[in-house]
Image (tube, rainbow, N blue to C red):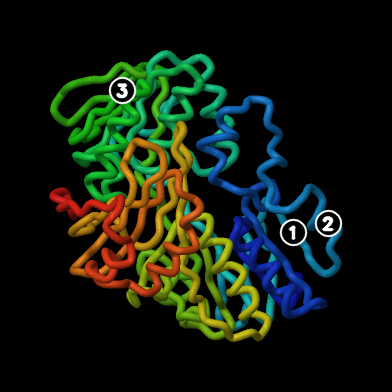
Amino acid sequence: MSIHEFDYVIVGGGLAGSAAVDGIREMDEDGTIALLTEEETPPYHRPPLSKEYMQTTEAPRDLLYVKPSGWFEDQAGIELVTGARVERLDPTRLVVATEDGEVYSGRRILVSTGGRARALPVEGFGLPGTYTLRTAEDAEAIREAATGAHRVALVGAGFIGMELAATLRKLDLDPIVVDLEERVWGSVFPAPVSSFLQHYFEGRGVRFLLGSAVAAFDGAKRVERVVLADGDELVADLVVVGVGLQPNDQIAREGGLAVTDGVVVDSYCETTAGHIYSAGDVTCYPDPVFGDLVRTEHWDHARAQGRIAGRNMAGAREPYEHVPYFFTHVFDLSINVFGRTGGADRTIVSGELGSGRSVVYCVTEGRLSGAVLINANDAMDECRELIRERPTMDELLDRLGPEGSAEMVNTGAG
């Protein structure tokens, strides 16, 4: 058995892994790097999969790539290994092994294995015509299926369901969104924003069936119906399930690293095993603002944490202090979110929801905990700093001033 020896081994070819390459190179110009990815393509951006990429049938996949086509092949000392499924991590020997028997060793190893779409544990999940969305191949399959679909059901009113609803309307389909929760994006947005978004989507032809559990998918050779827990049925020939992400932390767990809904790291992105780091969707890290351990599944976090992890692998020793944001673009709304907004006690709206630009400040236990920016990209830097400071509600109101601000009780908190 031969061992491929590198200075750095990165397991996982998503945005975090690619950003780690950049971070390493900022500190170490000559160290050898192996980037192992299970997919057959170079690292690519996932946010467009449910939006622009889905809407454009002629879009080539390389438009998604994090780096220009051929970039990895042109870099000295960097080897991109596609189609490499890593199934074992040995923290003592600092090696990883792929399912086809290849072994890679490194002085430093990064686990950036991301996650996979959560399955819906009901009968019929997996029937032809039922999909989840995580990879470019998933997006292409859904896009192709949508061209011949008549009735579309989206299970889950989170990011995947809501973004796909907007996309499918642009493709002249009439989707219905089904969710167990009573409001859309309920874990992300405070009740006033959820209510606004639901009405906004309904005004553009999206239907909702909230407070409804899916019991099964039914059909002879492919999906034909969504069976609900109350016995009602929805006719559907295309179903996309978007009910969250399952972190790919198996090799870390089996390798003896601390794992709790993701790979546990310290503020320097190092795991409980020396010289092994983790970054991106799979990582459970100390929140730089709130202090507890969190796992964040968004593009900005993967990019920022991956870079810091790479720098630290190469000796920088810098804490991850970035306040990440997540974003979505649906219909004519550009939405950015900082901090924690879903369980706010109160909301303070600067501007007016539905009339162009607005910022919704979310207050939890008397302090600012998050902010939702709607068509207000110009306020991103200011809101990021506000979240760092976490002013009291009175201090926030003093900053905002009397004009254009209205406080309201968030009766849907939690």
Dividing the picture into quadrants, the one containing residue 95 is bottom right
Cα–Cα span, label 1 and label 2:
8 Å
Residue under label 2: 73
Labels 2 and 3 touching (C-beta < 8 A): no
Label 2 Cα crowd, 10 Å radius (few <14 / some 14-19 / many 20+): few
Cα–Cα span, label 3 and label 1:
42 Å
Q: Nearer the viewer, residue 158 or 75?
A: 158
The quadrant in which the C terminus is found is bottom left
Residue at position x 40%, y 64% in the image:
295
Q: Where 121 sits versus 22, above or below?
A: above
Residue under label 1: 80
Residue at position x 63%, y 25% in the image:
57
- Mark 3 is on which residue type? Asp
SS at circle 3: strand
SS at circle 2: helix
Q: Residue 336: x percent and y percent? A: 44, 51
Judged left or right of residue 215, residue 292 is: right
Q: Residue 343: x percent and y percent? A: 23, 57
Numbered-mark total:
3
- Mark 2 is on which residue type? Glu
- Mark 1 is on which residue type? Leu
Q: Where 67 sits versus 279, above or below?
A: above
Residue under label 3: 218
SS at circle 1: strand
Q: Residue 178: x percent and y percent? A: 28, 31
Cα–Cα span, label 2 and label 3:
47 Å
Labels 1 and 2 touching (C-beta < 8 A): yes
Q: Nearer the viewer, residue 97 or 115?
A: 115
Comparing labels 3 and 1, the label whose residue is closer to the camera: 1
The quadrant in which the N terminus is found is bottom right
Residue 187 visible, this orientation: no
